[in-house]
Amino acid sequence: NASLYDRQFSTPYFTEEGTPSSRSPITSRVNFRPSRNLTASLNMDYDINFNAIRSSSTSASYGGRWGLVRGLWTRRNIPDRDVTRSNFRFGTQLNLVRGLQVNFDTAFDATNKVVNNIRAGAVYNVQCCGFMVSFNRFNFVGLRVESVFRFGITLANIGSFGTSLGGSGRRSY
């Protein structure tokens, strides 16, 4: 259990002292997909130990052949330590012309009023090869503050080289 090593880490299944809880949270998940292009979801964990909402999130995405736009809001509440965290994430992928895609993602810590991450990149794929460039700015004060520029080239049936790990096209938060 990571809470034994990091006092900031907690899960709904363990107490803050790292001992297993005999009660798990009540989890609610609602997904809404009115069309193939539009999705939304709401997630919530209610902690019966503290009679409080422990975490909640809301997300939505809209996409089509042109690309994708997505947003996410999360809120984390640790009642016995009086800690509340709130974050927003926004991302977009645009398919400009056949084979060319640009991406932009950002994460904002609403509690501390700071932008934690900005990522922008472009990918160009043709039949024989692909090219990727991206810029990533991290701003996790006290943990990681840096800028990273990545590039990558992929040759069909041969392989790839560059610094494309964590590259473009990811659709996960």
Image (spheres, rainbow, N blue to C red):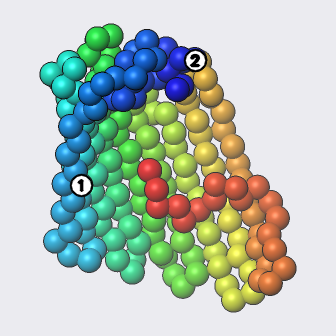
Identify whether 168 is placed above or below 145: below
**Residue at coordinates 52% horizontally, 82% vertically from top-left?**
97
Whether label 1 touches label 2, CB < 8 Å: no
Identify whether 1 is placed above or below 122: above
User: Is residue 96 at all visible to an observer of this figure?
Assistant: yes
The amino acid type, in three-letter code, at marker 2 is: Tyr
Q: Secondary structure at mark 1?
A: strand
Percent across and percent down for residue 53 are 20, 29
* Residue 45 or residue 169, whichever sits in front: 45
Percent across and percent down for residue 51 are 15, 22
Disc on res. 56: none
Name the residue that disc number 1 marks. 41
Give left or right: position of 124 versus 98: right
Mark 1 or mark 2: which is in front?
2
Give left or right: position of 81 versus 159: left
Query: Which image quadrant is residue 123 in?
Result: bottom right
Q: CA distance from mark 1 to mark 2?
A: 32 Å
Give left or right: position of 28 versus 115: left
Percent across and percent down for residue 59 are 28, 51
* Residue 144 or residue 136, whichever sits in front: 144
Name the residue that disc number 2 marks. 5
Q: Residue furthest bottom?
A: 127
